Amino acid sequence: MTLNFLGTGTSTGNPETGCLCTVCTSSDKRDERFRASVLLDVEGKKILIDCGPDFRMQMLRFLKTEYFTKLSAVLITHEHYDHVGGLDDLRTFCSETAIQVYAEQNVCHAIRERIPYVFCENRYRGVPNIDLQTVDMNPFTVQGIEFIPIRLMHARLPIVGFRTGSFAYLTDMKTIPETEYAKLKNLDTLVINALRFGHEHPSHQTVEHALEEIKRINPRRAYLTHVAHRIGLHAEIEKVLPDNVFIAYDELSLKID
């Protein structure tokens, strides 16, 4: 499996519009972050997790290094705009056959309401050909690849993380129910959200909270994502993290056994 970080920023991205802080004006490319999304390459199948408003630019950038014309599937963690705002741009990847988008029932409903023209009976030519697939908390298979949903709480909103093989992706999490830790044993690579240091947020973990969860889950290595500009400079953060914890950045690519 290859894990490609398409975006590692929070809902406002980085630079944040109008901000002149040291992070938003940094010349370090690792401090420039699109909204959070990853692309998995599993046995040659391209599986996208979340499709935010930066999807088009993310793919234009990614396809310069690895060209392909078909996505195998899309998994959606929840319905917030920074995770689904790019679904219309899937149209270039499903012009010939429908692309399956997997999400919980309430998320499928939200998607239908936001882009109704995609699902109406008489669709106009060129709209994305999306086949919504409802999932629950039971494991499901995407073209022969098993995914295990992980229940997460985004404040009071139930959302989903995903595990496949020895990899798990947990974003926008504030807390995780006690029952879900059993699904996260024996991980090689964990990706987990960490908004910033110190100051509490009502629906996102701080770095300190993320480190506590990493210590409990005990993966071989962990990467922080969905970070805000207030987290600080990438180069400085890496100096204070544990040896097996890293801050992810856009265009980072990892091999996972």
Image: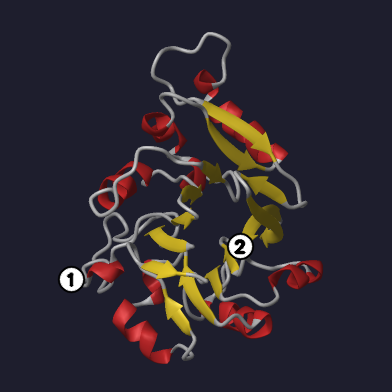
Q: Tell me, yes or no, if residue 233 can be seen here.
A: no
Which disc number belongs to residue 27? 1
The chosen color scheme is: secondary structure
Residue drawn 52% across the image and 77% down it: 222
Residue drawn 48% across the image and 74% down it: 223
- Percent across and percent down for residue 136 are 75, 46
Horizontal side of 142 relative to 243 (left or right) equals right
Residue extending furthest top? 122
Q: Amino acid at mark 2?
A: Ser
Horizontal side of 191 relative to 7 (left or right) equals right
Which secondary structure, mark 1?
loop
Which disc number belongs to residue 135? none
Q: Is residue 155 above or below residue 137?
A: below
Separation of residues labelled 1 and 2 (CA atoms): 30 Å
Q: Which residue is mark 2?
A: 203
Q: Nearer the viewer, residue 126 or 157?
A: 126
- Percent across and percent down for residue 241 are 45, 88
Residue extending furthest left? 27
Q: Tell me, yes or no, if residue 24 can be seen here.
A: yes
Disc 1 packing (10 Å; few <14; some 14–19; many ≥20) = few
- Percent across and percent down for residue 245 are 48, 83
Q: Nearer the viewer, residue 248 or 184?
A: 184
Which secondary structure, mark 2?
loop
Q: Quadrant of residue 104?
A: top right
